[in-house]
Amino acid sequence: MAASFTGVSPSFFLILSLTTTLFSSLIIISPSRCDPDSLQDLCIADLSSKVGLNGYPCKPASAVTSEDFFFSGLTQAGNMSATPFGASVSFGIVTTFPGLNTLGLSMNRVDYAPGGVVIPHTHPRATELVLVLKGSVYMGFVSSTNVLYSKVVKPGELFVIPTGLIHFQQNVGKGMAKAVAVFNSQNGGASLLSPGLFGATPEIPSGILARAFKIDEKVVDDIKSKFGSS
């Protein structure tokens, strides 16, 4: 039987129509990427500005040159001996390449020694898409339901890591490995789990970490000593 609307005022239908339209509009305009759309052709970051913004203010248009849209910082491998993990990340983000300001993307280069590891971390503001260029790299992420999704990725293959999830990488080949990672943010951020938990300043109380990891506080203090937090 068809519903009857006898006695319902026309204003009811007007309000219902407006509410439905507004709700639909909110769904359509909800953010689909980390950084907002640019409102102008270009906005080269003025990294020297003292103005506090969610991002960087633009340098004057009269000072912009073609060099602002060029970056050669990923042409050479980083210093893998500079960290104990055997992997080096070269950053192509807004702080190294100001031309990315407001454009909603960035790219890093990762070089791995044999057995080199990019330790578990998160990118709180970006999804990561990794393209392996050389070698074999085992990579994976853990979902919010503690499911591990992982794969050995070879040259020409891609692996995507959703925004904010814990992930890692390791060179499992016999030689050097190389990859590039693209992000849908000019600066997706990186939060390293082990230094963040055990090397924070001021430090996280050992009792909290002991309960979280179900270990003795003395073990926590020993781990902290390796990160300079104890």
Image (spheres, helix red, strand yellow):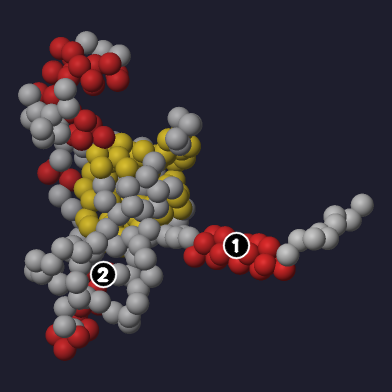
- Residue at 20% over, 16% down: 207
Q: Give the residue number, with chain letter if any, for mark 2.
A: 101
Measure the alpha-carbon separation of dots 1 and 2.
36 Å
Residue 47 on image: x %, y %: 13, 68
- Residue at 22% over, 55% down: 90
Q: Give the residue number, with chain letter if any, for mark 1.
A: 19
Side of 89 relative to 81 (left or right): right
Give the mark nearest the N terminus, 1 or 2: 1
Where 55 sits versus 215, above or below?
below
Q: Which mark is residue 63?
A: none
- Residue at 28% over, 79% down: 42
Q: Residues within 10 Å of mark 2 (few under 14, many from 20)?
A: many
Residue 178 on image: x %, y %: 31, 52
Q: Quadrant of the C terminus?
A: top left
Dot 2 lies on which element?
loop
Let me know if residue 114 appears in the view: no
Residue 195 on image: x %, y %: 19, 34
